[in-house]
Image: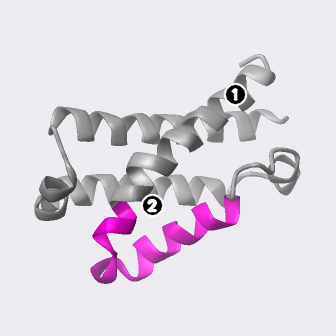
């Protein structure tokens, strides 16, 4: 794997950490998340950045590590960027509480496999 993709994966992990930190520090549950525009905006920005980074991964890396739905991750970025006012709070919450931790683990495993 090239150094650029390794750097991208590290950045994705950093944004996943920021999402986790925001949820933890603000002691968020779904109801609080839904009503707190500051938390929601901060988390949505991290999701947007993760999706942007996925778009920069090489096709070779995405094909080799194909157990992650890279296209779906990129798609949620497009939804966040272009239809922000219409984001479904439940889908966004499910993404950050279920999908982002899985993505983080997957990226960490890729880095470990590549001695990084």
Q: Is residue 7 left or right of residue 16?
A: right
| Boundaries of the magenta span | 70-92
Q: Say which mark, if any, is on residue 31.
A: none
Measure the C-alpha gap from mark 2 to mark 1: 22 Å
Measured as percent of width and height from the top left, residue 95 is found at: 44, 56
Q: Residues within 10 Å of mark 1 (few under 14, many from 20)?
A: few
* Residue depicted at 56% across the width and 41% down the height: 102
Residue sitting at 33 percent across and 58 percent down? 93
Q: Which disc is residue 109 wearing?
A: 1
Q: Is residue 108 left or right of residue 35?
A: right
- Provide the residue designation for mark 2: 48
In the rendered image, the vertical position of residue 84 relative to residue 5, given as above or below: below
Disc 1 secondary structure class: helix
Of pointers 2 and 1, the one earlier in the residue sequence: 2
- Residue at 59 percent across and 61 percent down: it is 73
Q: Quadrant of the C terminus?
A: top right
Marks 1 and 2: in contact by CB < 8 Å? no
Main SS of residues in magenta? helix
Residue 32 is covered by the magenta coloring: no
Residue 39 position in % (x across, y down)? 19, 52
């Amino acid at each position: 794997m090239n150094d650029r993709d390794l750097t991208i994966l590290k950045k994705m992990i950093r944004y996943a950490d920021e999402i986790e930190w925001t949820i933890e520090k603000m002691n968020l549950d779904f109801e609080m998340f839904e009503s707190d525009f500051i938390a929601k905006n901060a988390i949505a920005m991290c999701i947007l950045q993760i999706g942007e980074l996925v778009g920069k991964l090489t096709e070779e890396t995405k094909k080799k590590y194909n157990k992650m739905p890279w296209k779906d991750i990129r798609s949620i970025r497009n939804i966040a960027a272009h239809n922000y006012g219409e984001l479904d709070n439940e889908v966004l919450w499910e993404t950050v509480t279920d999908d982002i931790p899985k993505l983080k683990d997957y990226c960490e495993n890729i880095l470990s496999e590549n001695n990084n």
